[in-house]
Image (tube, rainbow, N blue to C red):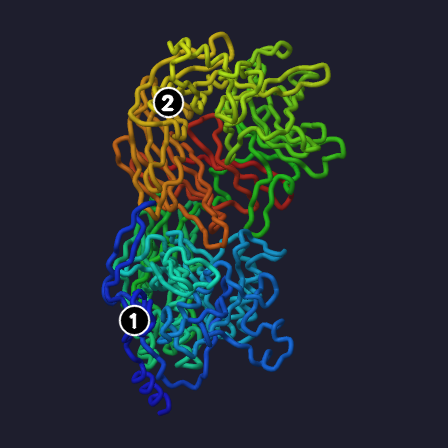
Amino acid sequence: MKKIILTTLVLQSLTALAGTNDPLYNKQWALENSGQVILKNISDLERVQVKGLSGVDINWVDTKEAKTEKKELIVAVLDSGLDLEHPDLKDRIWYNEKLCAGATNAANRPCYGYNYLDNNTILTDDVGHGTHVAGLIAANRNNGAGIAGAADSRIKIMPLKVINSSVNGFVYNGKVITDVIADAMTFAVKNGAEVINLSLGWPKLVDLAKVRQAFDYAEQNNVIVIAASGNNNKDLPTFPCSYENVICVGAIDNRGDLTDFTNHGSKVDVVAPGESIISTYPRALESRVLRIKNYETKRGSSQAAPYVTAALANLKLLHPGLTNDQVRSLLFRSVKKLAKESSSRFVKFGSLDMKALLELAAKEEEKAFVNPLMKGLTEVKFNTGDRRFAFNLELKNLSNIDYKGLVCLRSGSKAIELDQNCVSVENIQAKKSLSLPVSGLIQDLAGDSHILFTVQIDDRTYTTSLVFSRNLNNDAALIGQSLGQASFDDMAVISGDRRLSRMTRVFDKHRQIAFPEYFYQEKLKQTENASVVSLLTSEGGKFTVKTITLPKVNKVLSIHRQDINMDGKLDYFIYTLSNKKDELQFYILDEKLNPLFKENSTWSMTLSTFEGLPIDGGMEKFEWIKVKNPTLGNILVPSIYRSYTMPEADNSKQISERVIGAMSHQFYLNPKVTDKKVEIELRVVDSVKMMAALRKEMGILGTFDTKSVYLLKPFPQTMEESRSGVIRSLIVVDEDGIGQLHQATISLEGNNFSKLSSLSTEKAVDQSLIYPIIDSKNGNVTDEAIFTTLLNRATAEFLVKNDHEIGSIQHLNEDWENPVIALTATFAENGAKTYLVESRSSLTVLRDNGKKASLPIYRDSSFPGQSFSETITPILSEGRPGVYINSTLIYGERLYSMVDTENNGFIRPLSLSIGIPSGCVPLLPETLADKTQYNYVFLCTSPSKEITLKFLPMSHL
């Protein structure tokens, strides 16, 4: 009888929203959507008005008259702190009465929260994020100021500071940030918090045992945790959202659609408003968007999560004693369907409905509610031999009623066949779980490895995306070569989920040798006077480790293969920082690791603001040019296009001709042999004398001719150009801002500028980036090139340079939320071009005919100050263009590839979706004898300490 009376009182006291006297309330569409207009960015300079749909809100209800035995309920907000004196949060901050009432040293006690970053009681919010989140939950209603919070006035905020403006890495004051979060969570649970809001997240890399234990502790103590899904438009897990017991919240806009930025998929439980959200802001910070002091507009899943937090705080306030499973069950059963979903963007349950939630809680439970636990179900491995796979689907009964019924699973791909689609479940006891075995067969290895599955339980259907990958343990296609008992700990590290190589690839830009080489340093071999470099190379068809002993250096920066003395054999060019850090030193060895020029094989260059050789992202970003040296003979030396002061030896003595200040030039490292050593002299190809000769050759004569002539960044060298030491560059003849383009082959012999030819173009290219074009038939760099220009945040333009013009324009148009990042690679086959373009959330293949196809790529920027991305490397798979992707920084133990296949389009083939073998570390893909066929490469160790280099051909059929 008592429950029936309480239920009636609660239902009668739920009042529909009727407005407030808070001046910014009419902009709070999340609480009451009457069709308010919000502004949405569509370009760097443009915003459009988006009119809301009436009723697309959280369906807020006022609970102030609802009777409950609880005087207050505490919500812990783990964030960037809080403006404790904000007028709209007055009397809404938790007070630790037990510890602080009457205490003489209250200022040093956690009376209103705690700063776990700096281990003090200073909660100042220097970011604004925490104050914004807290206001959405608990800003005072009807106080004539600012906004209205979504929670009952009896809800109090416990601010726990775990981030600040200085957090931009994993460690702060000697502590891992997730350890800081763990300490704050433990404090919250021990001090009476019943709900925790985490509008932040972190990647797998720092998802450590301590923070997982803190979440387990919260669950064991019936404290419900709500977390933001993240803003990377991905369907893969981030933490802590991927913890099964955490309620993960994504974001919708004022029309009920998933926002462009929100994460999605079955790892996201529910959604709430997260676009153009107004809330409280620290008084000390400037309101840069809203331009109203003490308030600001923000967007993100960080803003969506507090609405769910407020709703569940209200629920627990009015219904003391609810278990976490009961809370989750009520929330998941009370949601509204999304206005729009697709097969690629969906969430597990739906959109927050506060009124439905509270009304459902006041009713008797009528039937069992079974929740399929999908957050931990991401990767499924299959064996290549029999193509079989198996996994378990856990079903949890969240209700107090036993379940009996039919559970059906269906694959969204013809590449997968399940052994059994439907299973009759005889009994899942109340509050218990059942593990349902699922098995099947891979029908088509050329199918896409990301496969949608649906799970139907009675009248509810759930969708999830599963990734299938090959189990390479005992896979016959994986070929290995033993390295014997080398020192694996110096070559790589395997620690928990971390699998990292300590080796560095020897640069062989044009893959002139038929095997990869790596170098590393073994700690025990280093001496006080010598640096010992271990070189992993191949000899007689077998991989082996050789030793290079150098005078003591601070660091070996890189090693390059090039025919330095132009005798037809590839030498070693070793680039180091001197032991005193005052010189760059180059050691030149022949193919047998002997000094190439005997006593003149060590070159040194004084360290200056010119810096050193440009090496970026594991790529050799310079050219090789031929120099005729009186002592060393004809040699190849690095040539670098860079903005720097012209060397005096190449400048003019005449003031009217002198080049003053830093300008872009084609520099080269010129070795000068003296009695004591070989010193590098910095020189330029485009000297004053040489440019004057060029002007004369081009007919630009006389003092009064106002035309200016200068070099642009060179084109990528072909293998033949690199071996012969010539450079092709664009020469710009500029008059009154109108430029004419000419292509020239540049050398330091005779006429510096030969094969001078005019290029026609209707586009300005002087600010464009230049990329190579790879011939798909042989894997070589062609003599064509791509000029790439970002016209705006979302549009890239690609121009093809051939012998007579810069044209063949292609454009890639993305949207503002998915800005173009870079051209990954361009491939050519029989003249037709294929562009692979990376954007924030996708990888697009763009073809000459204008057709395109895109696949998602995954990033994680949930961790403050850090952004993680899958590693993307261009490849050829059986001559077809594609990219290799290492996803281990984001999730799982998997490598995969995207390939523009001939028959199935742009896909992630099942045959190229790879589970990393046990005891192995992945290296970047490599070619062997065939440059059109890349291989997965692994460095592996066995229990007997034997080290093996393993290769798996990237065959997509």
* Residue lying at the far bottom of the rendered structure: 1
320 relative to 854, above or below: below
- Residues at circles 2 and 1 in contact by the CB criterion of under 8 Å: no
Residue underneath mark 1? 59
- Tag 2: Cα neighbours inside 10 Å, few (<14), some, or many (≥20)? many
Q: Amino acid at mark 2?
A: Glu
Q: Residue at x 39, y 35 (%)?
A: 823
Residue 394 appears anywhere in the view: no
| 227 to the left or right of 251 | right
Q: Earlier in the sequence, mark 2 or mark 1?
A: 1
Residue 800, how many percent across, how many down?
A: 33, 26
| 553 to the left or right of 809 | right
895 relative to 396, above or below: above
Front residue of 501 and 807? 807
Foreground disc of the pair 2, 1: 1
Residue underneath mark 2? 784
Q: Quadrant of the N terminus?
A: bottom left
Question: Residue 166: which quarter of the image?
Answer: bottom right
Residue 257, how many percent across, how many down?
A: 28, 58
Front residue of 890 and 386? 890
Q: Amino acid at mark 1?
A: Asn
Residue 653, how many percent across, how many down?
A: 55, 14
Residue 535 appears anywhere in the view: yes
Front residue of 428 and 51? 51
Q: Quadrant of the C terminus?
A: top left
Give how far apart the Cα atoms at labels 2 and 1 are: 60 Å
Q: Secondary structure at mark 2?
A: strand
822 relative to 498, above or below: above
Q: Secondary structure at mark 1?
A: loop
Front residue of 274 and 474? 274
